[in-house]
Amino acid sequence: MTIKTDAVIIGAGPVGLFQVFELGLLGLKAELIDSLAQVGGQCSELYPEKPIYDIPAWPVIGAQELIDKLREQIRPFEPGVHLNQEVTGFEAKDDGRFRVETSKGKAFDAGAVIIAAGLGAFQPRRLRAKGLDDLSASNIHYKVTDRSQFAGKRLLILGGGDSALDWTLDLADLAEHITLVHRRHDYRAQPASVAKMKELVEAGKVTAQQGTVGEALGVPGRIDALELNTLEREKVRVEGDEVLVFWGLAPNLGPIADWSLQIEKKQIPVDTEKFQTSIPGVFAIGDINTYPGKKKLILSGFHEAALAAFGVQKHLDPEARQFLQYTTTSPIMHKRLGVAEEKSG
């Protein structure tokens, strides 16, 4: 059976979930497809307990909590959710609609397709080092699902970006000590995070060590230490109970790369009016797209989803006039959100 819908959204991370909401406000139905076994994208898969500080009206919110709130927000629109499957087939039809097929044999007839796949079929960049394969270590982590397991431990955190610094700051008071290993003196994280990390270094809670990992040392089943090659071409041994690797994600567009879309450095160029790709009716939002001034923030993805929804509406009905209605005052918005009945009751 083919599912007919206004839009298929590929990717059920925070931006894909919010896209459901923005489409729903315009009266458009959406179906979500994701290769993971649960919605939430990187937030749920890689760092569910990570604190996020730049979501409007939330001074701080956990990554999984954000996903839970987004799911609650889109509940009135009842999107179809199709998990643990990848898009394997894509065809632009003569009538302007699209046929989308998944690895589980599901087929969709969609008026528009919105790619919200983050970095595609993402995988964390893995630690490669001499001796690592022989150890088959169980104390190496690429995500944090239960921060309490690191209480009182000596942690080796590898990385110099936002995730590495965020977890260094978050776990500093929980761990016995943290050694932050980065390949150079400059960090890619937010300057405020780097400043706070340096304060922890001065306080003796964190050791900042520059160098690359040359060898993993330990006994079968666990890593006890890493041998680093420093910038001064010396070898330094750093010891720890747990190793956390935050080297980012290896982007992989998967089958999307074969759609005849314009692609630049594994990202999809879009316009900034409606975030449409080189194929009319196909849109891209979130980390997977690129345009002048692009910033890879959840906040930016939310903005892109709002404008993409109007782009989808215009694509589906080019002759219809578009009106901006406010959720605070519009009876139509209240009805779609399911609050009209609550007010009348």
Image (cartoon, grey):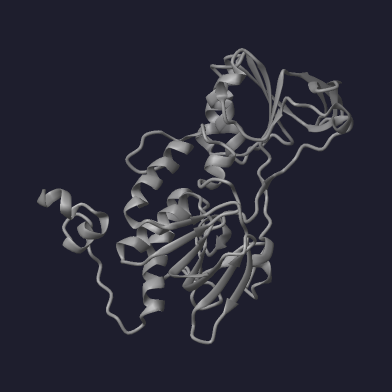
The quadrant where residue 227 appears: top right
Q: Is residue 122 visible?
A: yes
Left or right: 133, with 185 as reference point: right
Left or right: 208, with 311 as reference point: right
Total residue callouts:
0
In x, y percent, where is residue 254?
A: 68, 61
Which residue is farthest bottom? 94
| Residue sitting nearer the eye, 317 or 174 | 317
Query: Image point 51% across, 31% down: which residue?
Result: 49
Query: Image point 53% across, 52% down: which residue?
Result: 296
In x, y percent, where is residue 202?
A: 59, 17
Name above or below for residue 308 compared with residue 118. below
Left or right: 93, with 341 as reference point: right
In x, y percent, where is residue 146?
A: 56, 26
The quadrant where residue 4 appears: bottom left
Query: Image point 59% across, 49% down: which residue?
Result: 36
| Residue sitting nearer the eye, 215 or 319 | 319
Left or right: 196, with 265 as reference point: left
Q: Is residue 53 visible?
A: no
| Residue sitting nearer the eye, 271 or 124 | 124
Which residue is farthest front? 1
Name above or below for residue 34 compared with residue 205. below
In x, y percent, where is residue 292?
A: 52, 64
| Residue sitting nearer the eye, 342 or 246 | 342
The quadrant where residue 264 appears: bottom right
